[in-house]
Amino acid sequence: MAFTHDSTKTAKKSLFYRLITNTALHVLVAIVAGILLGHFYPSVGVKMEIVGKGFIELIKLFIVPIIFLTIVLGISSMGDLKKVGRIGIKALLYFEVVTTFALVIGLLVAHILKPGNINMGNLSTKDISKYTQQTQAFSWFDFFASNITLQVLIIALCVGIIISNLKYRVTIVNSFESVSKYVFKALTFVMYLAPLGAFGGMAFAVGKFGVASLIPLIKLLLCVYLTMAIFIFLILGSILKYYKISIWHFLKHIKEELLIVLGTSSSEAALPSLMKKLEDYGCSKSVVGLVVPTGYSFNLDGTSIYLSMAVIFIAQLYHVELSVPEMISIIGILMLTSKGAAGVTGSGFVVLASTLTAIHTIPVEGLAFLLGVDKFMSEARAITNIIGNGVATLVISKSEKE
């Protein structure tokens, strides 16, 4: 009886601990509080804009270091690109094709279902015309010259290639990895403030635009989950079926890793065990060692879908009309900025902020609308990312007969 009593007490204590440390629960409570404040006290809710904006500004501080470190490590960790050979080339080609496909799918679904198509009556015409003028005056030269995000991306690509060919590459990579760990650790602490950001963003949105502003957020959430489910079972499932592998069988094999990702909202948390599971599944150690770590920088399918949908969502909220050439430009920009997203909680939001900063035509302030639901979309992003990297490893292994 004593054992049973102690076990029950421990279980209750464990449950209590999970509740008080559950970020998703905190964000959910913050969302509800923000909605109530914005609805019953609109003027106070509007004043909470500073809280949401403050969190966004804090997140933006991580844009440059995260993109630089992720790109440099993603390239330099592969070693000399010439020595990587056929496997590396196949992997990079696969990553680019599949992630671009994911970007296009997200963009198309967002255009068809139009989750952000709502009348934001309180958004001033002056603000809308300002962004419309910027869209019409778009220039690739001015865009690059004034954009620190793309400049950092280009520099990181060059640095990564240079390090790949240096004699002391391993030592340098280890140093960058140490710095990267501290940066992401700092980001983890900042993400503890996500409930405050969600509260401020939601209170402002509801206080200024009314409860009706929640409709597109819920619609966006459903659209993201639907699109990622279609991508996993239709696109990735079809790719595996070509190689005579069942997507259901593979998902069952990595179910523990998927649960880890669901609980942490980070695909990186399951990286070591995923690599082991893929080796157990039959993939060679060399292919797993090359494809999986590289995929965490270059093959983020879930993040790609989310980014393209979120960009179009915010454009729809602010009534920014995008032409076909501009949408192609957005896909091109996202092909670069999405490579700066790591499997760490919050970094997808960082990349979205950097993408909007790079585009210039869509208000960065629109991120405030996403704060409330970003935490709940991060699970879908992370799960799709880890499944996508697992499928990529299987495909490359099969094509190499390894």
Image (cartoon, rainbow, N blue to C red):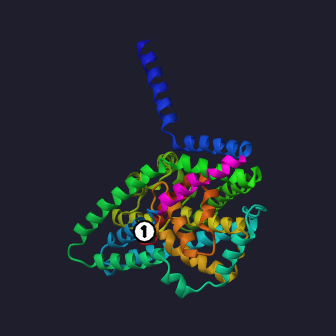
In the displayed structure image, the side of residue 122 where residue 20 appears, left or right: left
Q: Provide residue 158's location: percent of width, then percent of height.
A: 36, 80
Q: Quadrant of residue 115?
A: bottom right
Q: Quadrant of residue 82?
A: bottom left
- Residue in the picture at 57% in, 40% down: 25
For the question of whether residue 244 can be seen, the reply is: no
Q: Provide residue 175's location: percent of width, then percent of height.
A: 26, 64
Q: Residue furthest left?
A: 167
Residue 218 versus residue 297 in the image, above or below: above
**Residue numbers of the magenta segment:** 42-60
Q: Provide residue 402's location: percent of width, then percent of height.
A: 39, 67
Residue 139 versus residue 380 in the image, above or below: below
Q: Nearer the viewer, residue 358 or 383?
A: 358
Give the structural element (helix, strand or loop) at label 1: helix
The residue indicated by pointer 1 is 64
The chief SS type of the magenta part is helix
Q: Nearer the viewer, residue 130 or 276?
A: 130
- Residue in the picture at 50% in, 35% down: 20
In the displayed structure image, the side of residue 327 where residue 83 appears, left or right: left
For the question of whether residue 343 can be seen, the reply is: yes
